[in-house]
């Protein structure tokens, strides 16, 4: 319920932002406490009417859930929905979910993973297999062809940020692994 921030007593508010804040925290704690590699992110949040002197009557936010298993994603969505109901009851707010995208798991092909590891070994580089929630083009291509991904080190593991930095030598190594991988795959086809 939007209302004047200066005249609406704290105990009489139905503040959508309070509900949203509790929801974000609940999602973070719930998924963070789960075993496995599931992740959930609220990456966008917008309050309406969006004025400093008005109690927000509506909040729109995004929620993205990723995991290596679709069953886990579905389970998290159900659990998050139940949490939203509880938070709504506690804060006098309501939640409505409008799915806009499902981040489907796209496992990398063992053949491609083997070739990437072999390419790194050939070049005298260390490598490791690791699960990743990164989708990139591989997520779409995996529906009809074998895929793999090559990650190069970023300083402090920072990605998708202005602070992201990868040393030029690591970029070169990644490019050489990709080249060797493609040549190896081409020989095997």
Image (cartoon, rainbow, N blue to C red):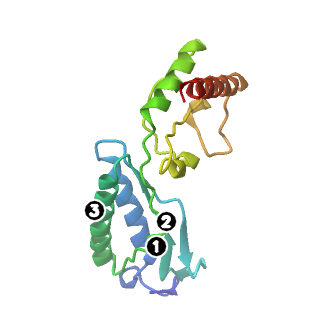
Label 2 neighbour load within 10 Å: few <14, some 14-19, many 20+ = some
Residue sitting nearer the eye, 124 or 51: 124
Quadrant where the image shows the N terminus? bottom left
What mark, if any, has residue 79 been given in the picture?
A: 3
The image shows residue 31 at horizontal and vertical percentages of: 34, 52
Q: Is residue 71 above or below residue 183?
A: below
Quadrant in the rendering for residue 124? top right
**Residue denoted by label 1:** 17
SS at badge 3: helix
1 or 3: mark nearer the eye: 3
Cα–Cα gap, marks 2 and 1 = 14 Å
Q: Is residue 107 above or below residue 90?
A: above
The image shows residue 83 at horizontal and vertical percentages of: 29, 66
* Residue closest to the far right: 168
SS at badge 2: loop
Cα–Cα gap, marks 2 and 3 = 16 Å
Residue in view at x 44 percent, y 47 percent: 106
Work out whether residue 30 can be spotted: no
Q: Is residue 32 left or right of residue 42?
A: left
SS at badge 1: helix
What mark, if any, has residue 62 been given in the picture?
A: 2
Quadrant in the rendering for residue 93? bottom left
Residue sitting nearer the eye, 7 or 149: 149
Residue in view at x 66 percent, y 40 percent: 163
The image shows residue 130 at horizontal and vertical percentages of: 43, 32
Cα–Cα gap, marks 1 and 3 = 21 Å
Return the disc, 1 or 3, that comes first in the chain's sequence. 1
Q: Is residue 52 above or below residue 78?
A: below
Quadrant in the rendering for residue 176? top right
The image shows residue 7 at horizontal and vertical percentages of: 49, 87
Quadrant where the image shows the C terminus? top right
Residue in view at x 43 percent, y 54 percent: 104
């Amino acid at each position: 319920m939007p209302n004047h921030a200066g005249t609406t007593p704290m105990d009489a508010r139905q503040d959508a932002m309070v509900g949203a804040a509790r929801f974000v925290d609940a999602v973070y704690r719930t998924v963070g406490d789960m075993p496995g590699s599931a992740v959930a992110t609220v990456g966008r949040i917008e309050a309406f009417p969006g004025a400093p002197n008005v109690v927000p009557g509506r909040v729109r936010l995004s929620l993205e859930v990723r995991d290596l298993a679709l069953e886990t994603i579905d389970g998290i969505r159900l659990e998050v929905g139940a949490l939203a109901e509880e938070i709504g009851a506690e804060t006098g707010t309501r939640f409505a979910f409008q799915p806009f995208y499902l981040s489907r798991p796209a496992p990398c092909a063992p053949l491609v993973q083997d070739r990437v590891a072999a390419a790194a070994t050939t070049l005298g580089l260390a490598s490791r297999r690791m699960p990743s929630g990164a989708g990139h083009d591989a997520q779409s291509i995996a529906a009809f062809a074998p895929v793999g991904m090559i990650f190069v080190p970023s300083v402090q593991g920072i990605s998708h940020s202005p602070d992201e930095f990868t040393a030029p030598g690591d970029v070169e190594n990644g490019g050489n692994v990709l080249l060797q991988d493609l040549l190896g795959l081409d020989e095997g086809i």
